[in-house]
Structures are given as structure tokens and as C-alpha cells.
Image (spheres, coloured by chain):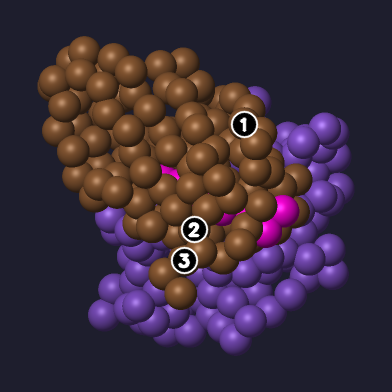
Amino acid sequence: NAGVTQTPKFQVLKTGQSMTLQCAQDMNHNSMYWYRQDPGMGLRLIYYSASEGTTDKGEVPNGYNVSRLNKREFSLRLESAAPSQTSVYFCASSQQGGGQETQYFGPGTRLLVL
Amino acid sequence: RKEVEQDPGPFNVPEGATVAFNCTYSNSASQSFFWYRQDCRKEPKLLMSVYSSGNEDGRFTAQLNRASQYISLLIRDSKLSDSATYLCAVNGGGGYQKVTFGTGTKLQVIP
């Protein structure tokens, strides 16, 4: 039981390049989330998926797109990376949405955009 | 006012000391409250949920004060291994209730 896994662990991009961050969970959770964490800003929600087949914007969605590929997988895409997107990205999942349950986090992806 | 606010610290305390952190929230309709622990360069992990009547887990005690809209975390008999950043998380009221995280309070336990 791996919990929540993320790939890659580290990535360096040049401005304008694109990439997809992958996330998968093996806990049969319905809800999945993408956060970014920056110094002094805490965890900020980018997008979430309350259940398979649905996605919604969070607090900071601009510059990102997501795909809930199936119940297990939730990917985050940067179409044209910008230096402001340098951050640590965490994927999380919970059994149900609604913010009433524990969220389980992946180990994170450290992204540097030059 | 931010939705969730924490003192960033750092709180530097000697081993064996008792330390307490507070976390204030702005939405009076919030219903669920959590404390997460985050070690340096790691992901957040749930430390404990916070229940209305308060709850304890070993050396850790969490309390909720709805009237003043804050939650607290008390750590007794601090260990070196308690050194970490402690994030509070609060869900919003109405509609799909997403969780908002505080920026975290850093604790450093000193030998």
C-alpha cells in the first residue's frame, strides 16, 4: 500500500516549456487535490476533484490544467511554465470531499522554472 | 483578515518543556479542524483532528474555541523529534467545503 505517489520528484524547466505532474493513490479515495506550497504562503489549492469525472478550480488555478484520468490518477499540467510557478507541488487525496476528512499527501514535486 | 492564521514562530523550546500554538480562523461556519505536522522537505501528515470537546493523544492535546474562533495544540514533555512545522487546517462553510491550511508554526526543540 503505497498511499499517494507523485512523479517526478524534481524537475527543472525553462520558461515556456510544458510538463505534466503525475499523481496516483491506491486507497480507493474519491477526492483528490493539487496544492502548491511557497515560503510564507502555506499550502494553496490549485485544483481539486471531488469525485471521478469532476474537477474544479481552487484558489490559484491560473496557468494550470488538470485531468482526473480515473479514480486513482489525477494529473496537473503546466502548459507554458513561468518562473512564478517555481514551487513545491503536493497531491493529496481523501475518502470523501467536503473538507471533513483527513487528507493524505504525496511526497511532493519540487519544480524550478528558469 | 486571512481565513486561517498562525504565528510562524519559530518557537525554540528546551526538551521537556510544554509548548502551545494557536490558530485563528475567520469563517464561523467552519465545522472541521485538523493539525498536521510537516517535517523539513517532506509532505504534511495528519497529527490529529480537533473535536468540539477537545481531544488528547498522548502528549498532544487539541482544543477548539468556537466563541473566539481558534484552535490550539498543546505539546507536553517536548522531544527533539517534535521539531517540525505544525499546520492547522480548517474547512469552510457552505457549498463544497474545501480545507484551508495555515502557513504553519515552526517548532524547534533544543537539547
Q: Earlier in the sequence, mark 2 or mark 3?
A: 3
Mark 3, residue position: A3
* Display colour for chain B: purple
**Total label count?**
3
Question: Which label was assigned to residue A92?
Answer: none
Question: Which label was assigned to residue A55?
Answer: 1
Amino acid type of the residue that numbered disc 2 sits on in the rendered structure: Gln
Mark 2, residue position: A25
Q: Earlier in the sequence, mark 1 or mark 2?
A: 2
Q: CA distance from mark 1 to mark 2?
A: 16 Å
According to the colouring, which chain is brown? A
Label 2: chain letter: A
- In this view, the residue in front, B2 or A75, is A75
Q: Position of residue B42 (x, y in %)?
A: 33, 58
Q: Residue at x 29, y 15 (%)?
A: A80
Amino acid type of the residue that numbered disc 1 sits on in the rendered structure: Thr
Q: Position of residue B77 (x, y in %)?
A: 48, 84
